[in-house]
């Protein structure tokens, strides 16, 4: 059963075989079923899948690092109410033509998660630098 394709796998970090395994696994098939379809062992499918996922994660980290080379930076002063932060971030993103992947609510949740040690109540206990990436992701 060779040649399973999405039409998007040319010139990627995945081998054709890794792509086949990921496609079949995404369809909900077990490693054993994939092995039978591809005429190989479950162990080989496991190795192919593990390496494919590692390659995908490495590509994601590479993209994140590339995007972080030239972020738009928002500096938020100590004492600022965290419910005012999204407005500052969205305003700066708009000025630079960046569409954020966050809503106001998800940005506040992200802030509470990533900067919990710099928040007391609803106020920042120290200055905070927020990086807006061209992809719309936000880094703290």
Image (cartoon, rainbow, N blue to C red):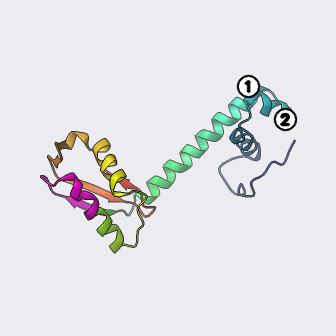
What SS does tag 1 mark? helix
Q: Residue at x 44, y 53 (%)?
A: 65
Where residue 68 appears, x then y in whole percent?
40, 57
**On screen, 92 above or below 35?**
below
Question: In this picture, which residue range is highlighted in magenta?
Answer: 74-88
Q: Is residue 14 left or right of residue 79?
A: right
> Residue, x 13% and y 53% (percent of image)?
78
Q: Nearer the viewer, residue 20 or 59?
A: 20
- Give residue 37's mark: 2
Give the residue at x 64% y 34%. Answer: 50
The image shows residue 11 at horizontal and vertical percentages of 69, 57
Mark 1 sits on what residue? 43
The relative height of residue 86 versus residue 25 in the rendered view (above or below) is below
User: Quick one: which residue is furthest to the front in this view?
Assistant: 105
Whether residue 9 sits left or right of residue 37 in the image: it is: left
Mark 2 element type: helix
């Amino acid at each position: 059963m060779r040649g399973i394709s999405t039409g998007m796998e040319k010139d990627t970090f995945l081998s054709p075989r890794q792509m086949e395994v990921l496609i079949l696994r995404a369809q909900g098939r077990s490693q054993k079923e994939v092995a039978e379809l591809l005429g190989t062992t479950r162990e080989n499918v496991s190795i192919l899948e593990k390496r494919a996922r590692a390659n995908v994660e490495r590509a994601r980290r590479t993209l994140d690092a590339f995007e972080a080379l030239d972020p738009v930076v928002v500096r938020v002063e100590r004492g600022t109410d965290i419910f005012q932060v999204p407005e500052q971030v969205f305003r700066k993103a708009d000025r630079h033509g960046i569409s954020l992947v966050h809503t106001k609510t998800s940005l506040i949740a992200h802030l509470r998660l990533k900067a919990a040690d710099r928040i007391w109540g609803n106020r920042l206990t120290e200055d905070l630098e927020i990086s807006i990436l061209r992809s719309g992701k936000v880094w703290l």
